[in-house]
Image: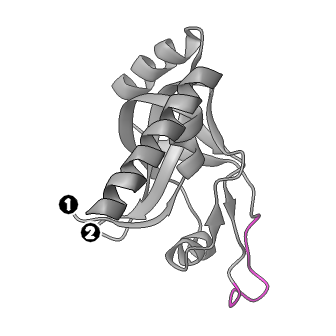
Amino acid sequence: MEKKVFLKNKSATFEYAIEERMTAGMVLTGTEIKSIRLSKLSFNDAYCFFDQNELWVKSLHISEYANAGYISHNPIRDRKLLLNKRELKKWAAKVKEKGYSIIPLCVFINDEGYAKMEIGLGRGKKLHDKRESIKARDNNRELQRYK
């Protein structure tokens, strides 16, 4: 399956230790999908939460489509994520454990033209874990310079 990534949440892998990843569909309106294809979205403070056994993403900012006319969408509305019931139950049980949260990682369009979101189940990193991530990133940069 080929995917074209429109936006990655770079701060998610720095702030969280991602243990599991999953791809979820998104419920969108017509103008939202057009804005995603133009890469007009932002992950600032976006997170996922459960409401009545359904998974939602909050604070995902999808800009208004410029050519929409009078019919447009709310840029920061809550959007439903589509997963199987078995997957939802599994992750809901994990989120109830201390320290786990569901983080949006990237948004892409698959071969059939549907917008998908890759979400991750992760724990927040401590300060010393973040320092190790910075050291590893700097070491990789140094190695790339010498190659």
Residue 40, percent across and down? 62, 73
Q: Residue 76 lies in what quarter of the image?
A: bottom right
Q: Is residue 80 left or right of residue 66?
A: left
Residue 116, percent across and down? 42, 56
Q: How many marks?
A: 2
Near-viewer residue (46 or 89) = 46
Q: Which residues, given as a range, are shown in magenta?
A: 66-74
Check if mark 2's residue and mark 1's residue have beta carbons within 8 Å.
Answer: yes
Find numbered disc 2 in the image and state the secondary structure of the residue it sits on: loop
Q: Residue at x 50, y 19 (%)?
A: 92
- Marks 2 and 1, how far apart at CA: 7 Å
Q: Earlier in the sequence, mark 2 or mark 1?
A: 1
Snapshot colouring: one colour
Q: Give above or below for 146 relative to 56.
A: below
**Amino acid at the residue labelled 1:** Met
Quadrant of the snapshot with the C terminus = bottom left
Q: Give above or below for 88 relative to 35.
A: above
Q: Residue at x 59, y 15 (%)?
A: 99
Q: Residue 20 lies in what quarter of the image?
A: top left
**Amino acid at the residue labelled 2:** Asp
Q: Which mark is residue 1?
A: 1
Residue 84 shows in this picture = no
For label 2, the residue is 111
Residue 135 shows in this picture = yes
Q: Residue at x 46, y 41 (%)?
A: 119
Secondary structure character of the magenta stretch overall:
loop
